[in-house]
Image (tube, rainbow, N blue to C red):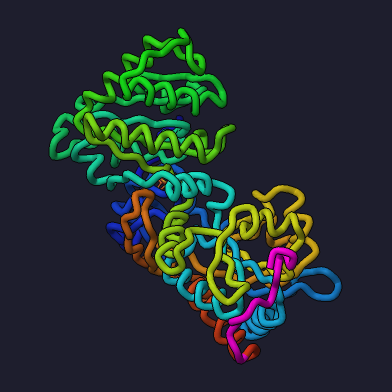
Amino acid sequence: MSYEPPITDYDTIVEDCTCAFCGCNCDDLDYLIKDNHVVAVRHACRLGASKIMEDIDQRLLVPMVRADDGELEEVEWDTALDKAAELIAHSIRPVFYGWSETSTECMKEGLELGEYIGAVLDNQATICHGPSLQAMQNAGYPIQTLGEVTNRADMVVYSGSNAMNSHPRHLARYAVFPRGYFRKRGRFDRTVVTMDPKFSDTAKMSDKWIGFEQNGDYGFYNAIRAVLKGKKLHADVISGIPKEDIYELVDQMKSAEFGVLFFGLGLTHTLSKQRNIDIAIKMVMDLNKDSKWGLTPMRGHFNVNGFNIFMAYETGFAFGVDFCRGYARYMLGETNTIDLLTRKEPDVFMVIAADPGAHFPNGANQHLANIPVIQIDLHWGPTTELADVVLPGSFIAVECAGTSYRMDGVPIYMKKAIDKPETCRDDEWIIREIKERVMKLRKEPNVAPKYVPNPAAE
Ligand code: SF4
């Protein structure tokens, strides 16, 4: 790697900014600013720094509406907002999807609009940690904050997560390397274990790698639970791991003073899905009879957890919340975005701070191509090609302030550092404007069922 001299040509430094990339929400960043641009970022990892500094690439700068010839045309804000409001006000089955890369304040406006119009509100959990949320509803949620991990944890386990690549500062800032109140020697006071079929970068820097076989998670965790309950293992090898290694691991886990299990989509999305997380939660509860243990999902988008916490607080359901009957309801496989789209139910789709065009299965995107799509985002992406109305937002934690929730559920205030482009607007403002315009077009809120997915069941 060639040497890059430090940036010295800047006007100001804005200290203690928060990274709006992954669920670590690192809030110790310094932005070096010149001519209203972030020219360098101190303390961030490469993922965070590249998002913060290169945000102008493919930036959506003006509102657009798709014209009759099929091309997106630049329009005034009023025209675009009126068009979006008209589509939503006249829809029967609107779905508002995304929210994980915007502020919780914006979600509040979205919830008011969704409740008023009878929409479905859903976020990226529907395609990532949704099974984890299901498992928490089934089995409980023995969590701890990342601050507790820094100060107390002497055993850290990563399961189905390659944090070195997906959350690069997770180890450096919170879980492994930092010195804590009870862990004065930092890394030397902690045992790190990676459980993953792959010998990942995280496994390389761990003290122990448990490379159980693909889809062997459930059997492996069950074996740990059996040993924790004093049972003998009859098979010599379980999920590809010799039973002696499992006995040794259980001894280590039981004798930890404070242990933490961080799990990623590698655990959530293998064959047993939410049952993997059920068993991991129960394993942590079993460990709490001998020691102190907690667990935390490695949330990806910086505020994906915020949507789930906010919606659970406001409606009782963490994602896939359907207001079509005039009250909040949630039914897995029925009120989640992919299921709705593959059943071709939505007639208007508003996507905010997400890119379903890049991430959804083909069948879901095919329906998106056939219905009006409203996009609120920073950058041009596959969803822009499907969109009928495009509303350029602004970058939370750089161009506007807002609140997000870290992966451990701690709310973080994200400050503004530079001005947004003159032609862009804050996400919160955009949603509020749409809401007010929809309320003018539809005088009454939705209080009665306006859409019955399965009339036979009524
Ligand atoms: S670890 Fe995540 S939040 Fe922290 S700087 Fe890197 S991308 Fe940003």
The quarter of the image holding the C terminus is bottom right
- The answer to which image quadrant residue 423 occupies is bottom right
Pick whichever, 355 or 398, lies toward us: 355
Q: Which residues are magenta?
A: 443-458
Q: Judge by depth and name the residue closer to the eye, 140 or 417.
A: 140
Tag count in the figure?
0
**Picture coordinates of residue 433, whole percent (x, y):** 55, 82
**Secondary structure character of the magenta stretch overall:** loop
Quadrant including the N terminus: top left
455 is within the stretch colored magenta: yes
Position in image of residue 328 (x %, y %): 53, 69
Q: Residue at x 42, y 41 (%)?
A: 167
Specify whether residue 97 is in view: yes
Q: Is residue 328 left or right of residue 68?
A: left
447 left or right of 309 in image: right
- Does the rendering let one see residue 36? no
- Report the residue that reaches farthest toward the right: 69
Asked whether 430 or 72 is in front, the reply is: 430
Q: Residue at x 51, y 41 (%)?
A: 274
| 122 displayed left or right of 203 | right
Residue 168 falls inside the magenta stretch: no
The image shows residue 122 at horizontal and vertical percentages of 56, 61
Q: Residue at x 28, y 25 (%)?
A: 253
Identify whether 196 is placed above or below 394. above
| For residue 448, above or below residue 246 | below
Identify the residue at horizontal 59%, vertical 32% (top origin). 271
In which quadrant of the rendered view does residue 254 lie? top left
Q: Position of residue 76 (x, y in %)?
A: 65, 82
The answer to whether residue 22 is above or below residue 214 is: below
